[in-house]
Image: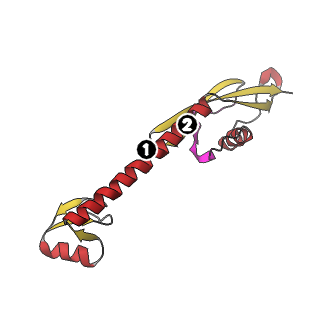
Amino acid sequence: MKIILIKDVKKTGKKDDILEVKDGYGKYLVTNNLAVLYTSKSQDILKKEQNAKQEQENNEIKLANEIKKKIENTKCKIKVKTGKQDKVFGSISSKQISENLKNQNINIDKKKIKITNEINTLGTHNVEILLHKKVKAILQVILEGER
C-alpha cells in the first residue's frame, strides 16, 4: 500500500513522505489520521503544498537578506563606563545590542544575536546575527568609553 504521511510518525517517516507500507499498517495510519492513500489527487495536493512552502521559504530568505544588508551597513555604537586604563565595567549583552538597533529602526530579537566572545574592551567587535537558518549577518559593535 502506498501512502503519504500527514504527520511525523516515529520510526516510519516525516510529514509529506511517500512510503510503501504493508496493508495492515497502512490502514492503521489512515484510520488514525497519520496518513492518506497515495492517489493522483493526493499527489497533486502534496505538490501544491510543497510549492507553497518553498515560495514562503524563498520570501523569508529574501526578507532576511534585505535586513542583512541594512545591518551590515549599520554600526552599533555603545557608550560604556570605564575605569583606570580604559577598563570596561562588565560586558555588553545581546539585550543592549538589540535595544541599540531598535533605536536605529532595526528590530532584531535578542535571541538571534550570538555573542561568541565577551564584549568587554573598547574598540570594534563583530557579532553574528542569525536572521534565518540560511542567512547570517555580521554587525560591528563599537564600544566607546565615558568616564
Q: Is 132 placed left or right of 18 in the picture?
A: right
Instruction: Answer whether residue 46 is visible to the viewer in this image.
Output: yes
Q: Is 98 placed left or right of 117 in the picture?
A: right
Q: Secondary structure at mark 2?
A: helix
Q: Residue at x 49, y 46 (%)?
A: 60
Check if mark 1's residue and mark 2's residue have beta carbons within 8 Å: no
Give the numbered dot on residue 120.
none
Instruction: Answer whether residue 12 is visible to the viewer in this image.
Output: no
**Magenta span of residues:** 108-120
**Considering only order in the chain, which callout, 2 or 1, is on the residue closer to the N terminus?**
1
Name the residue that disc number 1 marks.
Answer: 58
Q: Is residue 61 above or below residue 36?
A: above
Main secondary structure along the magenta-highlighted residues: loop
In the rendered image, residue 58, in percent from the top left (x then y), is placed at 43, 44
Q: Is 33 placed left or right of 116 in the picture?
A: left
Which quadrant of the figure has residue 22? bottom left
**How busy is the neighbourhood of tag 2: few (under 14 within 10 Å), some, or many (20 plus)?**
few
Residue 37 within the segment the image draws in magenta:
no
Which quadrant of the figure has residue 13? bottom left
Q: Residue at x 56, y 35 (%)?
A: 68
Name the residue that disc number 2 marks.
Answer: 66
Residue nearest the viewer, comparing 87 with 102: 102
Q: Residue at x 82, y 23 (%)?
A: 84
Q: Is 82 placed left or right of 73 in the picture?
A: right
